[in-house]
Image (cartoon, helix red, strand yellow):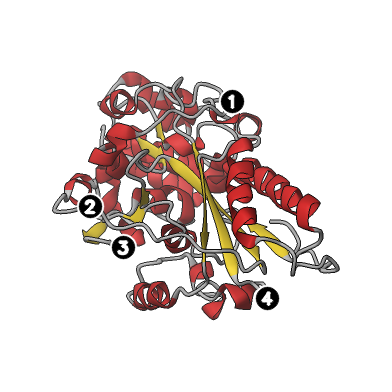
Amino acid sequence: MALARNDTTAERHDVDLTTLSHDIKRWGQELGFQQVGIADTDLSKAETRLLDWLGRGWHGEMDYMAAHGTRRSRPAELVTGTVRVISVRLDYFPAQAEPADSVLQRADTGYVARYALGRDYHKVLRSRLQKLAGRIESVIGGFNYRVFTDSAPVLEKPLAQKAGLGWIGKHTNLLNRETGSWFFLGELYTDLPLPVDTPAADHCGTCHACLDVCPTQAIVAPYQLDARRCISYLTIELKGSIPVELRPLMGNRIFGCDDCQLVCPWNRFARFTAEPDFTPRHNLDALQLVGLFGWSEEEFLKRTEGSAIRRAGYEGWLRNIAVGLGNAPTSPEIITALSVRKDHPSALVREHVTWALSRHL
């Protein structure tokens, strides 16, 4: 997140905003973004859906989703003077990764969501967006802006839909007709009254593949996600004990879950990323659970440096892998690996190890 610029000394009355908007999109593509769009700040419909979601308690322990009041759905309350949001997307699916379906079928191998295999995307997108803002500033002079990448109270998917980057699918991820859903989003809030793009239309039709495939049935209805049941929430956001009834449904998914994206027909058109930063690191695209479970905290910190996986924390990492080992086929190696951790200092880890061992003994 970048601080807002307050230098507004540049005279803007002679700036052709239509030309500037075209230039911004061109500059964005030159910086490596696959698409750039511009939206206004009216998120009243999205705000209603957000308040309903929060009212149902579907955000679970993600208290930050409710902590900022209407600043999440009213951009000008978050950054004073904001009238437009420049929304960008960046493909992340790595061609070099072991095929996702293959990893999911190998129950003794840990599955890490494809977005987390390489460098932390926050850093990559923030840097690019900051460069885009600098390019704008070099042409028109100082202007007020702020850069966001999934790091502040921002409704990025509704904004991206308004900016024409895609539509929010039944699984609640953003979808694009040309490239599916394997991309990151970022935003640049600005006081520049740029022309806005046409919002994207919904193209999910009668398809319900994502609802059918969800391992924990977290997609309770089209466009409605109970995060408390979502494996991404359980393995990343949840800091305590994973509900016992959901553990067998998690399989070997130890950080995030991609099932709803893997089954989506629109991802037939997905493109591999050209970003070296998103290349899998440390073979995390297909490492055996036993080996991962043996990592010391020092090794965990070393191998996840600059990675989104750090968000789970070391105890959460061991907790998740213990569940995966509990779901794997019984073997002497798995029983030994779990037994070594049964007296772990963390009560959270011990609980999940005990559960996992009970599945094998």
- Residue 11 percent location from the top left of the image: 81, 68
- Say which residue appears at 17% left-offset and 53% top-offset: 205
Mark 1 highlights which residue? 276
Mark 4 or mark 1, whichever is nearer to me? 4
Left or right? Give the position of 260 relative to 181: left
Mark 3 or mark 1, whichever is nearer to me? 1
Secondary structure under badge 4?
loop
Foreground pick, 297 / 22: 22
Mark 4 highlights which residue? 81
- Which sits earlier in the primary sequence, circle 3 or circle 4? 4
- Say which residue appears at 71% left-offset and 49% top-offset: 130
Q: Do labels 3 and 1 touch, CB within 8 Å? A: no
Mark 3 or mark 2, whichever is nearer to me? 2
Cα–Cα span, label 1 and label 2: 32 Å
- Residue 334 percent location from the top left of the image: 36, 25
- Say which residue appears at 40% left-offset and 49% top-offset: 232
Mark 2 highlights which residue? 204
Q: Quadrant of residue 81?
A: bottom right
Q: Amino acid at mark 1?
A: Pro
Count numbered badges in the picture.
Answer: 4
Cα–Cα span, label 3 and label 1: 34 Å
Q: Amino acid at mark 3?
A: Asp
Mark 3 highlights which residue? 226
Cα–Cα span, label 4 and label 1: 36 Å
Secondary structure under badge 1?
helix
